[in-house]
Image (cartoon, rainbow, N blue to C red):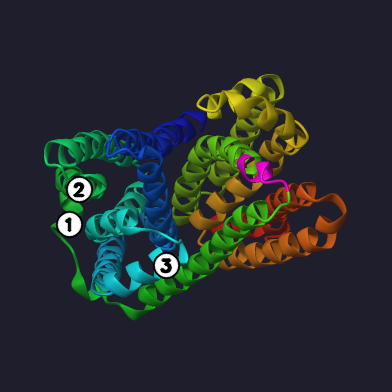
Amino acid sequence: MNREILRLALPNIVSNITVPVMGIASTMIAGNLGGGDTTRAIGSLAVGVSIFNFIYWNCSFLRMGTSGLTAQAYGAKNHRECTATLARTLLVAAVLGALILLLQYPLGQTAIWAMNGDELVAEYFYARIWAVPAGIMLFGLNGWFIGMQNARIPMWIAILQNVVHVGCSWFFAFRCGMGIAGIGYGSVVAQYLGVALAAVLIVANYREFITRIDWSAVFDMRPIRRFLVVNRDIIVRTLCIVAVYTFFTGASARMEDRTLLAVNTILLQLFTLFSYMTDGFAQAAEALTGRFIGARDGRSLHRCIRNSIFWSLAVAAVFVGIYLVWWRDLLHVFTLNSPESSAYIIATAGDYIGWIIAIPIASSLPFLMDGIMVGATRTRVMRDSMILSTIIYFAIFFAFSPLIGNNALWCAFLLYMLLRGVLQYFMTHRLKDIYRQADAA
């Protein structure tokens, strides 16, 4: 079972790590555009990227919803439903992508105004917006591959996108003189090539599935209703996550000490680094959970969950050790370009580093529980636990922020993460409901 978990988890981790790599490359290109205002170019890129992060984050439900449903169909050896799920996902992605393109002008104007963006942000936005349909399709495609127990194809797609994005962004920005818009067009080329590679690999690896597609199954209302309910719950969950992270940044910016915004942003990056690693095991758990439930293999499901808990806690323990020993060195990496303020930021961060050391342990369970619930398509449990955790997050912050300031923000965040996992565990009667799904005749 450990081999199965690692076979899925390690490629997922590589795929996750490519996300910040692409961001770093884009920032480096923006920083070398010239024109006498490097800070403005980097800042405008950051604002533009934030807008697209918001768009993509709210469309990410397609990946999670698709993987759980596909994994269960795969475990049940229901090839017809595997193919139908892929077709439904791509149809939804195409409709969403087309809708966003049609509304690009009002969406762009509203987002740029809300983020206080300038004309450089607009240039980037209206260039990269054409990548959105492909980006949304890739959510569905990657979810389908993971559900089919194949994490390597999403990894190769992610690597291709990174290489193409860097090369095309550089070419368009410098050789073609497009400036910041060139970085946006680099994303467009990378995303569509990612979709093209996915299509080629589907034909190469799953020809027997797609050549026998049953369109009556695609439009069968019963699985469509299930598909919509699963994705509805995940959308609500995603909105709660967006609310928490957006509020976290906003509350940090409103602190009396302006240094706290920089400190909290850097500390949150340390949490994000951990999440890239542990989320790989969560995605492995969702693929295997769905597969064993579909196959009605309760014994394997027990082993999968038990071993996944071990790996999640092991990753958390490693990161606790890293943060405990090397937190100053890690913070120094984030502040290399500002040596005059680095010492003060690190000293201030020392007052809150305890929260970051504790968060890997507190958040390893919720990441894993999310994966298990997605694989079991128990998305209502995931949604309800997220809503309750979000309410408690805001309640704790507003109750204690007048007393302990920034510590209240981190305390609320830690409990929010911990409660997500604890609530899901007990709302499924200590996972007994999940095991019963696999044991059902």
Marks 3 and 1, Cα distance to the nearest angstrom?
A: 44 Å
Q: Position of residue 132 (x, y in %)?
A: 28, 59
Residue 287 is at least partly visible in this image: yes
Q: Earlier in the sequence, mark 3 or mark 1?
A: 3
Between disc 3 and disc 1, the foreground one is 3
- Disc 3 residue type (three-letter): Trp
Disc number placed over residue 113 in the picture, else none = 3
Measured along the vertical axis of the image, is residue 124 above or below residue 361? Answer: below
Q: Which residue matches tag 2? A: 202
Q: Main secondary structure of the magenta part?
A: helix
Left or right: 178, with 410 as reference point: left
Marks 2 and 3, Cα distance to the nearest angstrom?
A: 41 Å
- Asked if disc 3 and disc 1 are in contact, CB closer than 8 Å, the reply is no
Q: Position of residue 83 (x, y in %)?
A: 25, 60
Between disc 2 and disc 3, the foreground one is 3
**Image quadrant assignment for residue 242:** bottom right
Q: Which residue matches tag 1? A: 210
- Disc 2 residue type (three-letter): Ile
